[in-house]
Image: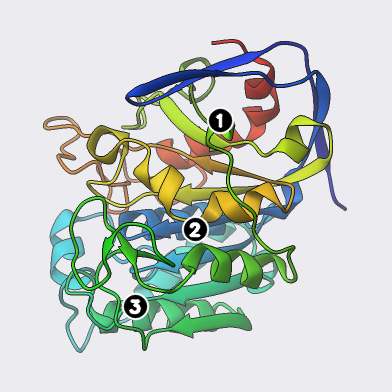
Amino acid sequence: MTSTKTSTLIALLSGAVLGAGFSIPLHAATINIDIDETTVSGLSSGGYMATQFQLAHADIVKGAGIVAAGPYYCAQNAITTALAECVTKTSDDFSIEPLNAFIKQQQLANKLADENAISNQNVLVIRGTNDETVNQKTSNLLVKQYQSLGVENIKYVDEKPFSHVFPTLEEGGECTVSQAPFIGACDYDAAGEILKHLYGELSPPSDAVKEHLIAYSTHDTASPAKAGMSDETFAYIPSSCQQGEKCVVHISFHGCNQSGEDVGDAYASLTGFNRWAESNNMIVLYPQAKKSKLFPMNPQGCWDWWGYTDENYATKDGQQVKAVRAMLDDISNVMARKD
């Protein structure tokens, strides 16, 4: 059964995108969010994080778009394994069997969604042939893992000459060069391909409205500092959602060195999701990881896919998974909050 979250918008919401302040007048309206139609996506460490959130909450998440990442629990709670097997190289004898055994164990402990919820997911995996950061075997293992979990509606795009970037039609830098902001003009609308695969037929995209991309504090809701996250999160809130139409939520996770600390709002504004959101009753949530030099050691602002927060990082009990779920649950109230 589909559940709908409802909140009444009673005030103006003020926000500030990094480096450029503005206020957004949101008209008094009833905001309807269909939480059971949530989807996720991510690049690199954000791809690993998207899969973690998907498997933890497959009861409400209906699919994932993963760009340049490997299988769930690849690092097995060890940064040494992450670097040795899950990024630039993967040994020939590396197997997903221990990873899937961990999934089964966590399902029995109710720390991941059950196998039926996972098998019903829609999944699109993308990896460019010029990606020198995440190797082909790692990406192949992710696809194999999804298939082993019973996912049938899976599509794999692995023949296009992308570097380690989020591919767009024309935004960002050179497609074959992996450099900040790690968004590439590749003549390929990855955001659109992801959303169409996850949701099915959509209305054509329209121009994103700059003023609909906001930054707001999640400090009171999500305990971001404890999770190694920034308390400032970006969200794109289209006109239809402001005016009371039922909306879905897509959560997109940036990659390492791609948070607001490094690239401002580039990931939230240039990846292309907002164009589709504006014309399809969709809110896009862009949580932000935070750099840290010590405790936890995360100098590149990556999402936790190897255990820098704690050993529960890949399950419902993971600090970042819990924080993002809190953001999702609170997003209607965020719209009514005046920061």
Of label 3 and label 1, which has the lower sequence position? 3
- Is residue 292 shown above or below 61? above
Of label 2 and label 1, which has the lower sequence position? 2
User: Can residue 318 be seen?
Assistant: no
Q: Amino acid at mark 3?
A: Ser
Distance, label 3 to label 1, CA atoms, is 36 Å
Q: Nearer the viewer, residue 182 or 207?
A: 207
Contact flag, marks 3 and 1 (Cβ < 8 Å): no
Residue picked out by circle 3: 139
Judge left or right: residue 248 versus residue 244: left
Q: Nearer the viewer, mark 2 or mark 1?
A: 1
Residue at the image point whose x is 63% and y is 57% from the top: 58
Q: Residue 1 appears at what percent x and percent y?
A: 88, 53
Residue picked out by circle 1: 211
Q: Nearer the viewer, mark 3 or mark 1?
A: 1
Residue picked out by circle 2: 41
Residue at the image point whose x is 38% and y is 58% from the top: 171
